[in-house]
Image (spheres, coloured by chain):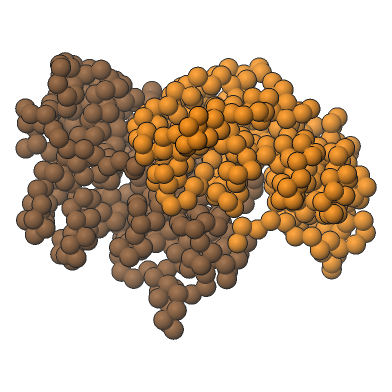
Chain colours: A brown, B orange
Amino acid sequence: MRESQTGGHAVVGSGETAAQRAVAGADGGVGPTVADLGERALIDRLTAVARRAVPSHPGHGDVVVVGPGDDAAVLDLAGSLVVSTDSLVQDRHFRLEWSTPEQIGARAAVQSCADIAAMGARSVGIVVSIACPPTTPAAVVLGIDQGMNDIAAEFGARVVGGDLVAAAEMVVTVTVFGTTDGRAPVRLAGAAVGQTVAVSGPLGSSAAGLALLDAGITDFAELVAAHRIPVVDLRQGPVAADAGARAMTDVSDGLVDELETMAAASGVAVEIDTATIPSHPLLRAAADAVGADPIGWQLGGGEDHQLLATFDGQPPAGWTAIGAVVAPGDGPRVRVDGAPSGVRGWQSF
Amino acid sequence: MRESQTGGHAVVGSGETAAQRAVAGADGGVGPTVADLGERALIDRLTAVARRAVPSHPGHGDVVVVGPGDDAAVLDLAGSLVVSTDSLVQDRHFRLEWSTPEQIGARAAVQSCADIAAMGARSVGIVVSIACPPTTPAAVVLGIDQGMNDIAAEFGARVVGGDLVAAAEMVVTVTVFGTTDGRAPVRLAGAAVGQTVAVSGPLGSSAAGLALLDAGITDFAELVAAHRIPVVDLRQGPVAADAGARAMTDVSDGLVDELETMAAASGVAVEIDTATIPSHPLLRAAADAVGADPIGWQLGGGEDHQLLATFDGQPPAGWTAIGAVVAPGDGPRVRVDGAPSGVRGWQSF
């Protein structure tokens, strides 16, 4: 069971972590580096963590036939394989100054598992490749891996393999695979005129948390926590599929950006009403504190990883209708409160 | 059909490539960079390449249900899922000065598909994440991707998705997945006393090619080509599984290193006879030209990606017996020509 929908992630998000203590060190040092510990020893420890992880598979048995330590992992899937890959680059996608290694690993796993959920599928396994300088504290690598294992287990997935290589900067690449459990995958291109557009939870929380961190404001801890690890119920992916979702994605690059992608793939346009977009209760106060527009966070802020879907009728319980699919015209594919939106999402380059 | 077992890879390994021409440019420039072209436009081109790729699946239908362009790819597998991930870092694992982008992509795909073959399985799909500086010529990214698509198609696999992110240096992470087609996976830990140790083809070619490049020697083109793209028949993985292979891996980190790993995992020792290790006909002459020991290349050189397996009796056709599994003693787990080997394989850190 995912137990943290209502307030952060108890396992990986709270208090000082083992990795932080190791990084800080009783002597003020940073503990052994990756080079100190050695590749083999570090991989042995990562493998041991993965073997200890006990995923929550409500209603499903363990599918891992061969876990870490062999040439490849082997899994038995009941349905079709669903797979996605994402890379996170230090100081571009995460900052060790702003998040613990465990939080960074957890966020990477959420981000990747959200892509699986966005197909209406269930994550079952993760492989992670970590490129990092040899001078990286081993505790950072172990912490990232621990966070990934912990959150993966919450989603019912296991870390089943990985790679560790030397590089000038840290790049964490997560590949996650899941199963449709026999459901038809929910594509981006299924939106059609007359359908309802809905989201699975609050938007803008991650952008708010980032802005608060950037401004050095330590209040609004839940928003900061939501930036460090998105709070999203990925079981809503299969729930939406079962409820007849026609198109689905997750909000990783901002709502308008995702709507543009979905609308373009489907050959339609979308109208949304900002008054209906769900938000964290502290969002407006946080926006006031930072001097920002909360609607901007909701429309353009990425990394919430809430699910965004269209339905023929009303969305299932827990989802919020925010707009409708309409016929495309000469104008932009996404209209916000009746006007074109100038908001652009995150682009890497 | 893999058509290049006897002399390089016609599709990606020969002559000046489109990417090289684009990099060099008629005007001596480097063509548009990743930032010039833009993330979306570049991803559109990568997606188009993947959609055009026609994999060779002798005896198997296309398993891709959803390819690139959605949140995740979806594949129908007949057997258990087999998955592995590897990262390649520029100037550590590949050099743009020494290989074309197509060759680098092809090598990355061979390396990853070899891990699938080493389980006795067949590769069906690849996802690739490329982290690179925005100033990287777009032709480099497109070339790496093209090489990966081409070689994947030879192995019966398709590139079904990926990610592209900005970073300070280029890191290419390849995750490959395959299917057992109902075979039991061949583990590292299955070696037992009395079994024959065998390899699927010549060893030392890649190390020779690297040494030749390093020495600036342009003769022995087939060895240089074997470094740029390993020449290995990965169909021998399932062949070995069907022939009753008891333990299997691929030679990525050097023969002795892989034997040590396999012997340790199996709780046994291994004795090999260097006179029986198959080699490229030009290996000795190349070693003389460089002033190196060809046996050192065969024992310690990595990246040949030949398959290494144990069998209860003689290996199947095409394989070469090079030694035997023996009881472990007080000494090292690998004995070469009756003596302990001091050769160590490649370690990243």
Where in the figure is residue A296, as x and y percent of width and height? 13, 44
Residue located 84% across and 35% down the image: B319
Between A171 and A202, the one nearer to me in the picture: A171
Residue located 88% across and 37% down the image: B281
Between B274 and A63, the one nearer to me in the picture: B274
Between B301 and A198, the one nearer to me in the picture: B301
Left or right: residue A116 versus residue A33 is left
Determine the residue located farthest toward the front in the rendered image.
B27
Total numbered circles? 0
Q: Quadrant of residue A328?
A: top left
Residue located 45% across and 75% down the image: A30
Where in the figure is residue A258, as x and y percent of width and height? 25, 33
Above/below status of B230 relative to B14 = below
Residue located 77% across and 36% down the image: B221
Residue A182 in view: no
Where in the figure is residue B180, as x and y percent of width and height? 63, 32
Where in the figure is residue B189, as x and y percent of width and height? 72, 50
Residue A336 in view: yes
Which quadrant holds the C terminus of chain A? top left
Determine the residue located farthest toward the bottom in the rendered image.
A27
Left or right: residue A87 versus residue B53 is left
Left or right: residue B252 versus residue B40 is right
Left or right: residue B193 versus residue B172 is right
Q: Quadrant of residue B45?
A: top left
